[in-house]
Image (cartoon, helix red, strand yellow):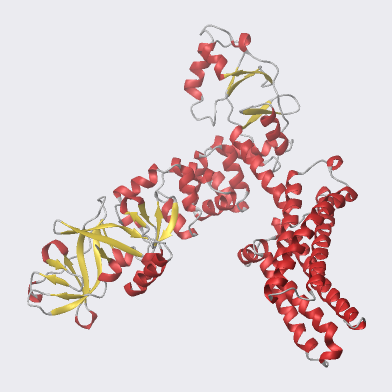
Amino acid sequence: MFYLTQMLGKPVVDAAGEIIGEISDIAIATGEVFPRVTSLAFLGPEKTPFMLSWRKFVATLGEDRIELNAERSALRFSYLQPDEVLLARDLLNKQIVDTQGMKVVRVNDLKLSESRNQLRLLGAEVGLRGILRGIHPVVERGVASVLKLFGRELNENLIAWNYMDLLDRDLSHVRLSITHKRLHELHPADVADVLEQLGPSQRARVFEHLDNAQAALTVAELEDEFQADLIDDLGDQRASDILEEMDPDDAADIIGDLSYDKAEALLRLMGVNEARTIRSLLGYREKTAGGIMTPEVTTVTEDMSVQEVINHLRENASEREGIYYIYVLDTDGSLEGVISLRDLVIAEPHTLVEELVSREVTTVGPDDDQELVAEMMSKYDLLALPVVDEAGKLLGIVTVDDALEVLEEESAEDLAIATGATREHGPLAGLWWWLVRRHAWLLVWGIAFLAVMGIRTPLLGAATPAADAPRVVGMMLAVWALMLLPLLLRTAEDLSSRTLAELIEDEDEDERIPLGRRLLREGGIGLASAVLSGLVAFGFSFLIIGELHPYTTPFVIATALATLLTVLLGGVLGHVALRRSAQEKPVSGAGLALAAMVMGTVMYLVLAYAVGHVWAAGSIASGG
């Protein structure tokens, strides 16, 4: 096995044994499952670049050099063919699409194998091992040895060529028969997942290789924040063609997010009917039934027979978003009833529509809230819901896929309001999530440690030992409390998590527990926690001293009391948070946890110092 990073820089030796350069790159033919190496690129004297045919001139490939079968004077320069790529230039340290894993990865090394006098590319190494090998093979072996001591393996993460697609090159000049085919075989949702991981320029390059139909399906699967940006980056004609392929409601959502000039330019390039349909949808307010409906509806009249309806579907309904129901209209376009596709299929061909129609139809108005529409579809198990105006005329339908998106969107918004997640954005959002939301207890502990250590030095050095005894004892117990502080912090974190769970469940106001009952409930939990934490404090003081310390008792009392007060404080904060949520005010889950931790920390350290101070002062006064 050979690795590209280990081959680069190795000497190239001609048939006379003279070193004529060092390897700078190798080329492969792209149209094979395991591409063969076709050319060798090396730098000659004074960094002069050379490229030779691998098949014609390479004799042997060793660990430390490449030997050629001809002398320098007999070598003939070769040129890169249209179906060839250079591994170091075009792949190494570049981003690729792993079309099997549907993700974007970076190539850290390339693995090759010699077979039947040919060198073939096995795949791209995208894991840690490739990075370490690129630094130096010794580093790779060293890390592998260390991990082996702990029973772990430094495994390769290899992606075969037929599961790769290039991103950082202009693919219009490279024929990638297998990889290009793989991209078109992916589901549009998977292609959308890949595109969302790319930058704008790379996204556009991959997008060029999708036809309009697949591009339309892919755009529909993208998250909202990517759709308008992608369409805005395309040329007007291509963007217009793609929007024409999309369902009108999806296209209208995207156009509504574009600038006025861009939107008008695209609409003018569309067909008259498509542009008229999209303009009509743009007239409805966002987050309403009209804003999410599609006007493409399959309709029939009562005097048609089943066979005529079937013929009508075959001729005119092939482009409809989903034929779940067939709607029956009168001569004025008013909705008379509905026929399910099931009823249509099992009926006799000569049966009239008026004998099958169900006249009890659930409808909504165009201005009805989209969340209400989605909840109605969920309640009545509907695959589509008709939207009618005040006169009862059918305007369009809301389909089940749109309803599911609404429910997901509304659920995410409600959760964001309940937890305050909407506030946590910006360049430091990742650090905030890791440090404050996931490791808040560690942050508070660190700050408390620095604060106590900063106060401890002047307090202990401010007076003579005899006069300072109560303060020395108080500070000693505060330092002990620092050691057990994580126990209290995790208790506060658990309390905030339970409150957050209540916020998400969103109970009715009548079902919420009053503050008095909440404190009684939390008090029972707090007493149990106080007993356990007191036992832990007793064991801790005994272990660090090696015997029963005179100040173990005040430390146990301070720890148990701080735990009880922290639990009760958590109950009060939880009650306040639930009241704010009932008023539709945002409540930050991280802020709630942080507040409980900070207050609990202050109480514990103050109690430990105060109890130790008082206890020591009492002992001195009593002559103990």
Nearer to the camera, 282 or 483: 483
Residue found 64% across the figure and 36% down from its top: 403
Residue found 77% across the figure and 69% down from its top: 601
Q: Position of residue 145 (x, y in %)?
A: 37, 69
Taking the view exactly as shown, the residue that stands out farthest to the right is 621
Compared to residue 451, the image places residue 34 above or below, namely above
**Left/right of residue 69 with respect to residue 461 in the rendered view:** left
Nearer to the camera, 488 or 104: 488
Nearer to the camera, 291 or 11: 11
Q: Is residue 444 visible?
A: no
Q: Position of residue 526 (x, y in %)?
A: 81, 56
Q: Position of residue 495 (x, y in %)?
A: 75, 55
Residue found 39% across the figure and 47% down from its top: 183
Compared to residue 548, the image places residue 591 above or below, namely above
**Left/right of residue 604 with respect to residue 343 in the rendered view:** right
Q: Is residue 536 visible?
A: yes
Q: Using the rendered view, name the quadrant where residue 286 is placed.
A: top right
Quarter of the image where the N terminus is located: bottom left
Q: Position of residue 198 (x, y in %)?
A: 48, 57
